[in-house]
Structures are given as C-alpha cells and as structure tokens.
Amino acid sequence: MNAPLKVTNISDLTKAVRLLGGTLEEAKTFRSYYEEECNYRIKIPGLEYQIGVRLDQKTGHYALQYDAYRDGHKMVKAVGAITQEYGVQRVMSAMKLQRGWRMIRKKLANGKVQLR
C-alpha cells in the first residue's frame, strides 16, 4: 500500500521517525510479505514488517510503502503517526528557515499537534 504522503525532505522524515521511536536508514529493500525495493526503510519497534521509502522518478518525491497484512492496525496507525509528524517537521523547518521563527509544540488531548 502507498501512504498518501509526498516526502520532499528526508531530513524532516528522519526527525519525524526518530520522535516516534523508529529508525530510518538507507536500504535497497524493506521487509513486508514480499521483500520489496526501496531507497530507505523505516523500522518501528513492535512491528514485524517495515515501511519502505521509494523515490518516484517522475515527481522527484518519495512515497511511503507498507504492507498491513501482518501488523494490520498497528502498521496503519504507525504510518498515520509518521504522516502527521512529518507534516509538523516540515512546517517547523520552513518557519525556521524562512523567518527565523521558533515554534512551541503542544500535543492535544485528541492526539493532534498544535504549533504556536
């Protein structure tokens, strides 16, 4: 499956994955039901399968690929958390670069992240 996320900055993706307790590393394959090709792979503690990060040659963006067969809901939840945290990291990087702003992040009771 492909996550609905276009990754344009591997550094921000690395930060997002680390904040969630995972690791992102360069690799040629990632573990799923089948071993699939990728440019990077994400390992999340507690999940047997990994998340692949593959470059789309047409767009120049990276896409997250995963197989929810074995880990099911946990995998979908992890991909959702990575998607959200990547968005937060992109905003924080953009604001710091463009305007020199520092941001305060607050996790809300509903699980969303608020930036001020």
Image: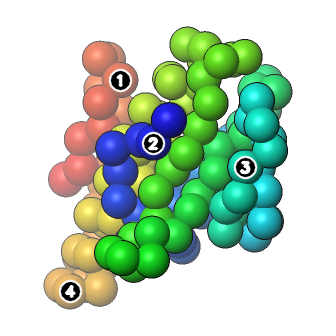
Residue ID for mark 2: 2
Q: Which mark is residue 36?
A: 3
Residue ID for mark 4: 98
User: In what element is the residue under mark 4?
Assistant: helix
Given this view, does label 1 or label 3 mark the residue nearer the observer?
3
Contact (Cβ within 8 Å) of mark 2 with mark 3: no
Q: Nearer the viewer, residue 116 or 97?
A: 97
Give the alpha-carbon distance from disc 4 to disc 3, as whole Å: 37 Å
* Amino acid at pointer 4: Gln
**Is residue 101 toward the left or the right of residue 47 in the image?**
left
Give the alpha-carbon distance from disc 2 to disc 1, as whole Å: 23 Å
User: In what element is the residue under mark 1?
Assistant: loop
First reached walking from the N terminus: tag 2 or tag 3:
2
Residue ID for mark 1: 111
User: In what element is the residue under mark 2?
Assistant: loop
First reached walking from the N terminus: tag 1 or tag 3:
3
Given this view, does label 4 or label 2 mark the residue nearer the observer?
2
**Is residue 73 toward the left or the right of residue 98 in the image?**
right
Q: Nearer the viewer, residue 62 or 86?
A: 62
Q: Nearer the viewer, residue 3 or 82?
A: 3
Contact (Cβ within 8 Å) of mark 4 with mark 1: no
Give the alpha-carbon distance from disc 1 to disc 3, as whole Å: 32 Å
In the rendered image, residue 74, in percent from the top left (x then y), is placed at 60, 18
* Amino acid at pointer 1: Gly
Residue 91 shows in this picture: yes
Contact (Cβ within 8 Å) of mark 4 with mark 3: no
**Is residue 115 toward the left or the right of residue 6 in the image?**
left
First reached walking from the N terminus: tag 4 or tag 2:
2
Give the alpha-carbon distance from disc 2 to disc 3, as whole Å: 13 Å
* Amino acid at pointer 2: Asn
Mark 2: few/some/many CA within 10 Å (<14, 14-19, 20+): some
